[in-house]
Amino acid sequence: MIRIRPLLSHGFSSVLRRCSTRGPLFLAGLFLVVLPPQAGLAQGSNPVLFGKRDFEMDWTVEPGAKMLRFRYHGATQRLRIDSMDGSEQTMHRDLAKGHVVVLIANGTKGAFAGSARPIGRFQPDAVGEMRTVAGESCREFSAGGQTLCVTDDGIPVMADFGNGQGMAQRLLRETQPAALFDLPKGLKPKPLPGGGANSIPKGLF
């Protein structure tokens, strides 16, 4: 039986609190409430979180040394996060529309869907120093009790949640095939934990 950990409406800190070193990592909590959705960044530059360029990025999340692989399609603002712990879990997020889909084994062992606040421009509570993460220059920003380090083109390469941290190990800005972000045909997803039947986005499936 696949065990799902209900993290729909939680941010990074909840992922860290609830994910142990055993069992599958439920990805739906990632980047759902990390930052406010609008307003400016530093000096009025107003980048969109995750940016407009395609990229692939590997993250390590501590505690537990969880490895995640992020893929991003800039033209459509679609994000794919694959858990690399053998749980076969993949999260698809449409950052512009707020759609969230979590698949187990590409949907053959389970599919879940819901909606979240779109992610876009953001306003930090405080602007910090420049640092280097995975060979990338980034600036630290504090927002919602968390600290992120974001590159000039909007890619978050580090997040510190107070009781844990996610950090990029490598970042490749290269074209991502659009097919990676397509959902399997014929899915009949269940609502993400915490959501009712009417929470499943219409027209996705």
Image: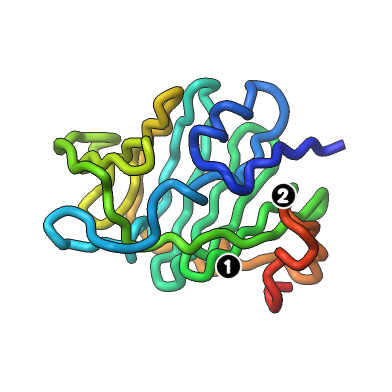
Which quadrant of the view contains residue 106?
A: bottom right
Q: Position of residue 91 (x, y in %)?
A: 61, 52
User: Label 1 near label 2: C-beta < 8 Å?
Assistant: no
Q: Earlier in the sequence, mark 2 or mark 1?
A: 1
Label 2 secondary element:
loop
Q: Position of residue 131 (x, y in %)?
A: 18, 34
| Residue drawn at point x = 44 percent, y = 37 percent | 59
The correct choice, above or below, for 202 with respect to 162 in the image is: below
**Is 191 left, or right, of 94 in this rendering?**
right
| Residue drawn at point x = 28 percent, y = 62 percent | 39
Q: Amino acid at mark 1?
A: Ala
The correct choice, above or below, for 52 with respect to 2 in the image is: below
**Is 88 left, or right, of 159 in this rendering?**
right
Quadrant housing the C terminus? bottom right
Quadrant housing the N terminus? top right
| Residue drawn at point x = 69 percent, y = 23 percent | 22
Q: Looking at the image, can residue 135 be seen?
A: yes
What residue would you read off at disc 2?
194
Label 1 secondary element:
helix
Q: Amino acid at mark 2?
A: Gly
Residue at the far bottom in the pictured view:
203
Q: Residues within 10 Å of mark 2 (few under 14, many from 20)?
A: few
Q: CA distance from mark 2 to mark 1?
A: 29 Å
What residue would you read off at disc 1?
179
The correct choice, above or below, for 129 with respect to 28 in the image is: above
Residue 90 versus residue 99: which sits nearer the camera? 99
Q: Position of residue 136 (x, y in %)?
A: 23, 41
| Residue drawn at point x = 39 percent, y = 60 percent | 37
**Is 14 left, or right, of 42 in this rendering?**
right
Q: Looking at the image, can residue 136 be seen?
A: no
